[in-house]
Image: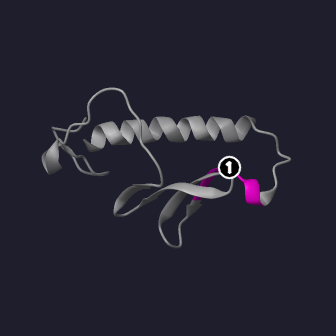
Amino acid sequence: MRFYITSIVSFCISVIALAVATSHHSQAKDQATGIEANPEVHVIRVLIDGSEVARFDAAGLHVQGDITYVGMIKDIGAEGYSAPGRDDANAR
């Protein structure tokens, strides 16, 4: 399940990053759209029109609103999850 959610989230972040890179620089600060990393509190925030719509932290992904997808979300369990630096034969 984490693999599919990670794939979906990665795609969404890529789309948002592309939109931010190609947007006009004349947006007001309170109307900002982008990705904001805060290493002091270990949080990555996704902002659209100045509002936080998603957040990544040590607990996982938190979304304000709906998530839509095509396909299947499958829980592969802890055995299927490969953390950075972990040599896992089940890594996907």
Residue lying farthest to the bottom in this orientation = 40
For the C terminus, the image quarter is: top left
For the N terminus, the image quarter is: top left
Along the line of sight, the residue nearer the viewer: 23 or 92: 23
Total numbered labels placed on residues in the image: 1
- Residue at image location 75% in from the left, 60% down from the top: 30
Relative placement, left or right, of 20 versus 25 is left
- Magenta-tinted stretch: 30-36
Residue 87 vertical placement versus 28 (above, below): above
Residue 13 lies, in percent from the top left, at 53, 42
Along the line of sight, the residue nearer the viewer: 84 or 76: 76
- Residue at image location 43% in from the left, 42% down from the top: 9
Residue 22 lies, in percent from the top left, at 74, 35
Residue 35 lies, in percent from the top left, at 60, 52
Picture quarter containing residue 6? top left
Residue 37 vertical placement versus 66 (above, below): below
Relative placement, left or right, of 51 versus 2 is right
Question: Is 87 colored magenta in this rendering?
Answer: no
Q: Amino acid at mark 1?
A: Thr
Along the line of sight, the residue nearer the viewer: 70 or 80: 70
Element carrying mark 1: loop
Disc 1 designates what residue?
A: 33
Question: Is 31 colored magenta in this rendering?
Answer: yes
- Residue at image location 15% in from the left, 47% down from the top: 77
Residue lying farthest to the front in this orientation = 66
